[in-house]
Amino acid sequence: MSVVGCSGSGKTTVARALAERLGLVHVELDAIYHQPGWTPLPPDDFRARTAAALDAAPDGWVACGNYSEVQGTVVWPRADTVVVLDLPKGLVMRRVVARTLRRVVTREELWNGNREPLSNLWRWDPERNVIRWAWTTHGRSRARYAAAATDPAHAHLRFAFLRSPAEVDAFLDAAG
C-alpha cells in the first residue's frame, strides 16, 4: 500500500497507523532519501534501497512519500492500493506550519540526524522551505494523483481519495 499527498497532509501519520492496524511494515521514503546533512540519495541508490525495504517485508508494507524516482518504478508496481490524502489547502497549511514550528523548537531529529532548519520559517525558495513547498505544490499534487488514478498503467491499483479528516478516520477505522 502506498500513501501519498502533499507535504503536511499526514502521509507518515496515516501510513504508520495503517501499518500498525494491518500488521504490516511501515516504509518511510523520506528516511531512505534524506541522508545526513539533507544530502539526497542518488536515484539508482534510492530505487535499490526502496526495493530492498519493500522486499524485506514479504507479508506486506505501507510506504509513504511522493518521490517520482521510486513511485512508478518500485513502489506502485508492487502495491495494490494507493491512499491519496487530498485535504483542503487551508488545513494542510495549518498542519505544516504547526509541524515545522514544533520541529524547529524541539530540535526533533527526523531522519539520519537531520533536523528541521530554522530557515524553514523564512526562506522564499520552495525547494528550501517546506511551508512554501506545501503551498506551491498542493494543487499540483491533487492534479498528479487524479491523473494517475485514470492512467491505464495503474489499472492494477485501487485509489482511495480521502478529502477530509473524517474520511481519513473512517478509512483507518475500516482498516482495523
Image: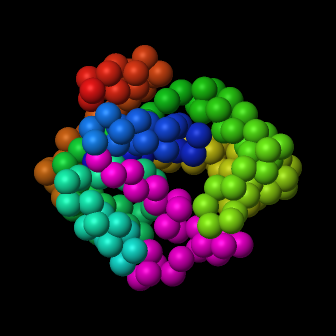
* Quadrant holding the C terminus: top left
Is 65 included in the stretch rendered in magenta? Answer: no
Q: How far across and how far down the image is residue 143, in percent?
A: 42, 44
Q: Residue at x 57, y 45 (%)?
A: 7
160 vs 12, left or right, is left
Report the number of numbered marks: 0
The location of residue 127, given as percent across then percent down, is 68, 61
| Residue 165: x %, y % from top left | 47, 21
Point 68% across, 29% down: residue = 94
Quarter assignment of residue 124: bottom right
Q: Is residue 114 above or below residue 1?
A: below
Q: Is residue 9 left or right of residue 153?
A: right
Which quadrant holds residue 74? bottom left
Front-lying residue, 168 or 176: 176
Q: What residue sits 63% from the left and 27% below the top?
A: 90
Residue 25 sits inside the magenta stretch = yes
Please state which of residues 14 and 71 is positioned toward the viewer in this rendering. 14
Asked if one can make out residue 123 in the rendered structure from this viewpoint, the answer is no
Q: What's the image's color scheme?
A: rainbow
Image quadrant of residue 171?
top left
Q: Position of residue 30 (x, y in %)?
A: 53, 60
- Compared with 165, 39 (above or below) is below
Tell me the residue at 69%/55% (across/down).
Answer: 109
**Observer able to see residue 65:** yes
Q: Which residues are magenta?
A: 24-46
Q: Nearer the viewer, residue 149 or 129?
A: 129
